[in-house]
Image: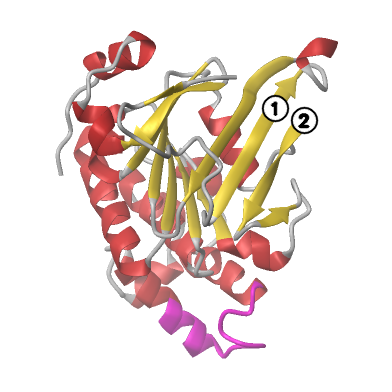
Amino acid sequence: MSHHTIPAVPAASGGQTSGALLELRHITVAYGGFTVAYGGFAAVDDVSIALKQGGALGVVGESGAGKSTLARVAAGLIAPAAGRSLLDGRELAPIRRTREQRRRIQMVFQNPDSSLNPSHTIRRILAEGMILHGMLGPHPPRDVVDARCRRLLAMVGLGEEDDILARRPRAFSGGQRQRIAIARALAVEPDVLVADEPTSALDVTVQRGILDLLVRLRREQGLALLLITHDLGVVNAVCDEVAVMRHGQIVADGPADLFFHAPLAGYSGDLLAAAREVAL
């Protein structure tokens, strides 16, 4: 498989970059059969990406391009038919990862309504992961857990009031629920945040706040961000690398600044021409 590397770029995000924090190498995911040759449909077809420590890679493309499937492979939620996932150069099991490996790669889903249990309090939503992974030591006192939960809420811009912890997700707006979902991911101090269309289910007026939050968290926490989106404006606002997917394959990749300023031909150029500009 070949794809377009943006001009004047010696190493692109789609390659197997040495020193990468997270790598997906030659990933193929087929539905309806183990491989395409046996009647399957390749949602992802021989895709390789590399994410650097503290970097932000935006995977962009139209609906059905395979972006979300690739994100779920990265997070260990889908086992590929072929290919390998590596963290710090060490191979990850497709799904049965160690607790530490799961901690280090956290996912934020598109719709917080489906990812947050409506019957749980915000305290329970935030505390479960940190207790499971022993972030506060064995059997932490309730006041220690609550203090950590309040710090997480403040980190994502929701304040530190105790009454927030006692509420349930339905008491919050869509943008606030997405902030809670991000706080839950941050609770276990991950190295990689996989964000699958984190703003597409939100009102346009709320999207900017979430994007600003991701930019700030990446800067302050040193997070590596794998951002899945159909919106090139979001990539322009947040990412320093971009990979364009179409029909399960990467058709172009490279630094975001060159992608948005260098002339492109074919599908990537058409996609860029149709995108609205979003500036920080």
Q: Quadrant of the N terminus?
A: top right
Q: Is residue 267 left or right of residue 135?
A: left
Going by the image, does 101 lie left or right of 191?
right
Crowding at label 2, few (<14), some or many (≥20) Cα neighbours within 10 Å?
some
Residue drawn at (34%, 35%) of the image: 9
Residue 201 visible in this rendered orientation of the protein: no
Q: Quadrant of residue 154?
A: bottom left
Task: In the rendered view, tell whether residue 200 sits above or below residue 160.
Answer: above
Residue of label 1: 29
Does 37 sit above or below residue 47?
above
Residue 205 sits in which quadrant? top left
Which residue is at the front of the view, 251 or 192?
251
Report crowding for label 1: few under 14, some 14 to 19, many 20 or more residues within 10 A (C-alpha). Answer: many
Please report contact status of discs 2 and 1: CB closer than 8 Å, yes or no: yes
Which residue corresponds to the image point at 24% horizontal and 20% vertical from the top-left? 275
Specify start and end residues of the magenta stretch as a single range.
133-148
- The residue that mark 2 highlights is 81
| Place of residue 120 in the rendered image (x, y in percent of width and height, measured from the top left) | 56, 60
| Amino acid carrying mark 1 in the image | Val
